[in-house]
Amino acid sequence: MPLSAFADPAQLALMLPGGPAPAGLNGIAFQPWQTAPKTLAGWSQTEGQASLDEPPLKPKNGKKAAAGVVITEADGRIWLVAPTNGFGGYQATFPKGRLEPGLSLQATAIKEAFEESGLQVEITGLIGDFERSLTLTHYYTTRRVGGLPTEMGWDRKPCCWRRSPGF
């Protein structure tokens, strides 16, 4: 996909690890998150967490707690990640991961967004809890505040799609 696809919100735009990236999107530059936490203690205090009235996550039936994000752009696009080799049966999905000891659900969600998409996000709200085959995932709405998708984790490829009506 050419980088010109980023100029049109109706186009699918794709970034690959180590590949080219536009200078920015919707007035936010694509630049590496230089101060991203490197430890669980750092992630527990990371910026972007919000003061939300959210219910506790109570997994049942052997499910593990997880947190994920829906990253939106000002022009209505959303970011997805494409797991390498369709891991988990997904062609494309929202960044998410299991809760790690010492991290809140919000910190986990922000960490997973960064690791899987290369993006720095800020939580804007709570969507709800969704049961998957192995997890109960707490999903948040977020907005991109920085980061560079071409520096995402090796096991993902992010892509940006226009938000569908009714989302």
Image (cartoon, rainbow, N blue to C red):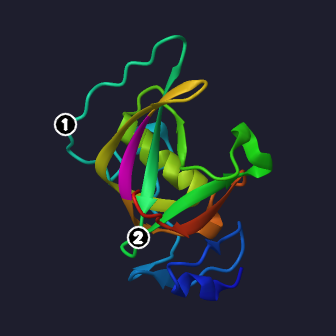
Range shown magenta: 138-142
Disc 1/disc 2 C-alpha distance (Å):
25 Å
Q: Which of these two is toward me, 107 or 132? A: 132
Three-letter amino acid code of the residue under disc 2: Gly
Q: Which of these two is toward me, 91 or 123? A: 91
Query: Badge 2: few (under 14), some or many (20 or more) residues near its Cα, within 10 Å?
Result: some
As drawn, is 36 to the left or to the right of 123? right
* Element marked by disc 2: loop
- N-terminal of the pair, mark 1 or mark 2, is 1
Image coordinates of residue 14 in percent, x first then y, are: 65, 71
Task: Name the residue that disc number 1 marks.
Answer: 53
As drawn, is 151 to the left or to the right of 50? right
Query: Badge 1: few (under 14), some or many (20 or more) residues near its Cα, within 10 Å?
Result: few
As drawn, is 120 to the left or to the right of 115? left
- Tell me, for residue 76, which label it has, or none: 2
Q: What residue is drawn where x is 38% and y is 19%?
A: 58
Residue 59 against residue 121 in the figure, above or below? above
Assess whether mark 2 and mark 1 are in contact (beta carbons under 8 angstroms).
Answer: no
The quarter of the picture where the C terminus appears is bottom left
Q: Which of these two is toward me, 155 or 159? A: 159
Specify the farthest residue to the right: 85
Image coordinates of residue 11 in percent, x first then y, are: 58, 78
Report which quarter residue 122 is drawn in: bottom left
